[in-house]
Amino acid sequence: MTKIHPTAIVDSKAKIETNVEIGPYSIIGPEVTVKESSLIKSNVVIMGSTVIGKQNIIYPFAVIGNPPQDLKFKGEKSDLIIGDNNTFREYVTINPGTKGGGLVTKIGNNCLLMIGVHIAHDCAIGDNVILANNVSLAGHVSIDDFAILGGLSGVHQFVRIGCHSMVGAMSGVDSDVIPYGSVVGNRANLSGLNIIGLKRRNFSRKIIHDLRKAYRLLFAPEGTIQERLADVSEEFGKNEPVMDIVNFIIGDTTRAICQPKNGSKSI
């Protein structure tokens, strides 16, 4: 049974599915869809062409779907698509897409966005992603599954953050982060692999060992990056996590990737 508090303002054109609860003083716009069993607490604003998936929880003062903060945006119709089982804590803000990025912002399933997180236009967030308090993403950022970003981190526009990676708190990330990598600092450098995350997600010792060896080869001082990528592909071609890193790097050769600091013995 759907419950809408009498002080909430829900446009008659909004699509509200079964077992949705909308709290006091929340505002839901005419192009919004809220799917079943989602909980929208008090003082939430959801506007624009926004789809909220199933079983999401949205805490007070979150503002979702308002126009992008992009001077090139001229009011064209754009979308915000949110998956299932996500939690959006207080003061989260999320903008829909723009013409320059396909007119859509996407968030997957089972994500946690803590207090004050901002997701700008045209971002693409995977599944099981955690963004800690006050993380801020510029436009066109992509974050793959199981990545974690520490509190107060900022991510530059167009940056890619690979799966199972870790960004340390208060980092400024202006280059791509390899899958399974761990970065920290302003501007962020690779500090090694996200070993703790790999162990927590039950990656085998063999896979972790191979990832370590591949990491050392990829970031060795000898040879070119193309030569090192070829060597790693030849040795670990059947190791899916290692090839995740290789394919990530070659997937967009126009992008810089976070590197270890000079002389670093990390990993």
Image (cartoon, grey):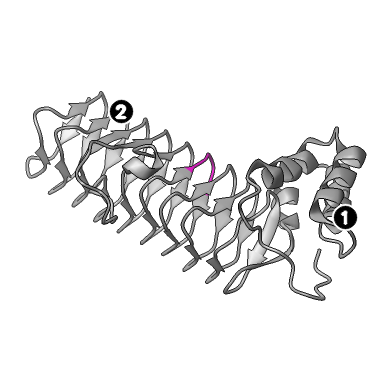
Between the residue at mark 2 and the residue at mark 1, the CA separation in whole angstroms equals 47 Å
Q: Is residue 265 left or right of residue 34?
A: right
Tell me if residue 54 comes above or below residue 261 in the rendering.
Answer: above
* Foreground: disc 2 or disc 1: 1
* Quarter of the picture holding the C terminus: bottom right
Tell me where residue 149 sits by quadrant: bottom right
Query: Which residue lies at the image location 25% right of the left edge and 30% below the top edge?
Result: 33
Tell me if residue 131 comes above or below residue 32 in the rendering.
Answer: below
Q: Earlier in the sequence, mark 2 or mark 1?
A: 2
Q: Secondary structure at mark 2?
A: loop
* Quarter of the picture holding the N terminus: top left
Quick check: is 28 in the magenta stretch? Answer: no
What's drawn in magenta, residue-wise?
Answer: 125-129
Disc on res. 35: 2
Depth order, front residue of 52/190: 190
Amino acid beneath label 2:
Lys
Q: Which residue is mark 1?
A: 217
Q: Position of residue 116 (x, y in %)?
A: 36, 61
Tell me if residue 191 comes above or below residue 76 in the rendering.
Answer: below
Amino acid beneath label 1:
Leu
Depth order, front residue of 125/115: 125
Q: Is residue 92 left or right of residue 45?
A: right
Query: Which residue lies at the image location 70% right of the left edge and 51% below the top edge?
Result: 180
Q: Position of residue 260 (x, y in %)?
A: 74, 67
Which secondary structure is most common in the magenta stretch? Answer: loop
